Image: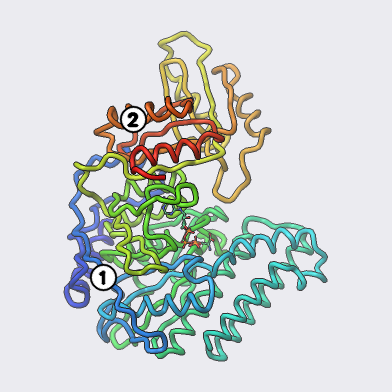
Amino acid sequence: MQALCSLQAAAAHQVAARAAPRLQRPETCRAGAPVVVRRAATVASRRHRVCKAVAAPERVEATAAAPGKLQQPGKAQDQVTVVYKFGGSSVASAERMMEVADIVCSFPEHLPCVVLSAMGKTTNLLLQCGEEALRTDASNIRSLAPLKAIQDLHRETAQKLRVDHACIEEVEALLKQLEQLLVGISIMQDLTPRAKDSLVSFGERLSTRLFAAFLNAQGIKAKQYDAYAIGVTTNDNFVNAEVNYQLTLPAVKEALTFKPGQERHLPIVTGFLGRGLQTGAITTLGRGGSDLTCTLLGASLGLPEVQVWKDVDGVLTADPRVVSTATPVARLTFEEATELAVFGATVLHPLAMQPAHECNVGVRVKNSYNRTAPGTLITEERAMEDVLVTSVVIKSNVTLVDITSTRMMGQYGFLAKVFDVFARNKISVDVVATSEVSVSLTLDPAKTMWERDLITDELEHLMHDFEGIAEAHYRRGMAIISLICNVQRTSEILERVFRVFGREKINVQMLSQGASKTNIALIVNDEEAKAALRALHQEFFGSC
Ligand SMILES: Nc1ncnc2c1ncn2[C@@H]1O[C@H](COP(=O)(O)OP(=O)(O)O)[C@@H](O)[C@H]1O
Ligand SMILES: N[C@@H](CC(=O)OP(=O)(O)O)C(=O)O
């Protein structure tokens, strides 16, 4: 990793100097820092080192070329200088793909690599196909409504984008394969996690082929790449696979570096997908995983910045579906962005900041529907003097567990035994508050982002495992409200929080701050959570 980062930094420095003077690369990636998957609380507690501040790249204003008159970005000798990721909402239709092509070609000084998600709600439709295939006779698979919707969307898009015949053939071949896979699921009466990953992979495989073909039809040289074919390697934990950074970073760098004499083109890469190391099968990085693909590619290529383009003006002060007047946050640190994602802001994938943080790649969140909005810039550090509260998020459907030791005070090893029980049950813990003889903690609503909620049987089994160690009780239907804030000013923040909650008669069941340097967590009843969020937003941001 150390050698890799230094190499990348040197290469990126040369590229930046020659091709992208407005984007300044920090000197080095953090030397010797292994990239490993951790949960947010661990990430937060590990960040004691003072890191070099990233020089904020200047905002690149859009100078949109008229559709149909797109210009090839970058110069003949360039390597990729930036990665753009467009999510499902940005590429939901042929018209949206045209708009995205226009955005991509609006910065002629940059040679971009483009990561795409599946079009619109295609991933959900694919999962629906899988579920319905289990209840449908193989001979009727063809008439499944979600399958028809997927076929119609991609055929219509191909037609509107006027892609070439080769692309139409590829799209038809993929749609045929998809149908065959569903027939297989119907016959086997089995939808394994491995088959699920194969199934949902069709979304990104289709969208990227259509988009690359459209660019080529417009005279822009572009080439489609499946992430699993250019070295994105994961473990074999299907539906939520973890990236193997040691293998992936050098492989992706090699695959996406232009060789002498090679024609420059825009790489168009499938987000969300990888290849399992042991099985060699297609894996996925968890829902919303294209954000991670984007930062992973940026880290592999040693770039100063990547941009994730969404349907909102950046990361907002609250979920806009709950607080309609939420406003964009101009700057965040990697740590704050991670806490936001882990504690409920669905705008970013919870692990997306990891490669960016380790290799110091700035992440800009932009709006593909409002391209001149400055968005949010996420970097290693930012000025915190004037910051009180940055954003408020909710994680709903949480279970609160209270555990009290049955032994006398002063016994050692109590917490170790408690956490061993969770480890054995493979249940992850979010927020913890402890005293010497008791511990309260919250459990993730789902074991993984894809799986169903923890079921009562599993919780009862967990309670059973505490027998002889402690008395344990659980309460479902709780929510974590997290204030991403300047914890140097905790007293002031909490004084205002409790004034608001007192007024609104909202009872706090548990409070945790300690380990995180960016987050105060308040546990309340789920049915009070949205009202509590709106009241807090009103208090700290002035409107709701
Ligand atoms: N704090 C937040 N800031 C911005 N958006 C948020 C926040 N919390 C939730 N969201 C939701 O996240 C959505 C964008 O994420 P997502 O749909 O995954 O984007 P994409 O599919 O384009 O990558 C927004 O439309 C918004 O409703
Ligand atoms: N298509 C995948 C991966 C992804 O990142 O999607 P989006 O960028 O639209 O959230 C999903 O729906 O989970």
**Which residue is depicted at the point 43% across and 43% down?**
393
Q: Residue furthest top?
A: 408
- The colour scheme used here is rainbow
In percent of width and height, residue 279 lies at 57, 61
Q: Which of 215 and 62 is in front in this view?
A: 62
In percent of width and height, residue 174 lies at 62, 77
Does residue 181 sit above or below 339 in this rendering? below
If the image is split into quadrants, where does the C terminus sit? Answer: top left
- When asked about the image quadrant of residue 23, the answer is bottom left
> Going by the image, does 147 lie left or right of 496?
right
In percent of width and height, residue 96 lies at 48, 75
* Sooner in the amino-acid sequence: mark 2 or mark 1: 1
Q: Which of 217 and 130 is in front in this view?
A: 217
Does residue 49 sit above or below 170 in this rendering? above
Does residue 531 sit above or below 499 in this rendering? below
| Residue occupied by mark 1 | 60
Does residue 124 sit above or below 263 in this rendering? above
**Which residue is depicted at the point 82% across and 65% down?**
137
- When asked about the image quadrant of residue 149, the answer is bottom right
| Amino acid marked by disc 2 | Arg
> Going by the image, does 104 lie left or right of 207?
left
**Which residue is depicted at the point 51% across and 38% down?**
428
In percent of width and height, residue 508 lies at 46, 26
> Going by the image, does 386 lie left or right of 262?
left
Q: Which of 61 and 131 is in front in this view?
A: 61
- When asked about the image quadrant of residue 178, the answer is bottom right
| Residue occupied by mark 2 | 496
| Amino acid marked by disc 1 | Val
Q: Distance between the residues labelled 2 and 1?
A: 38 Å
Q: Residues within 10 Å of mark 2 (few under 14, many from 20)?
A: some
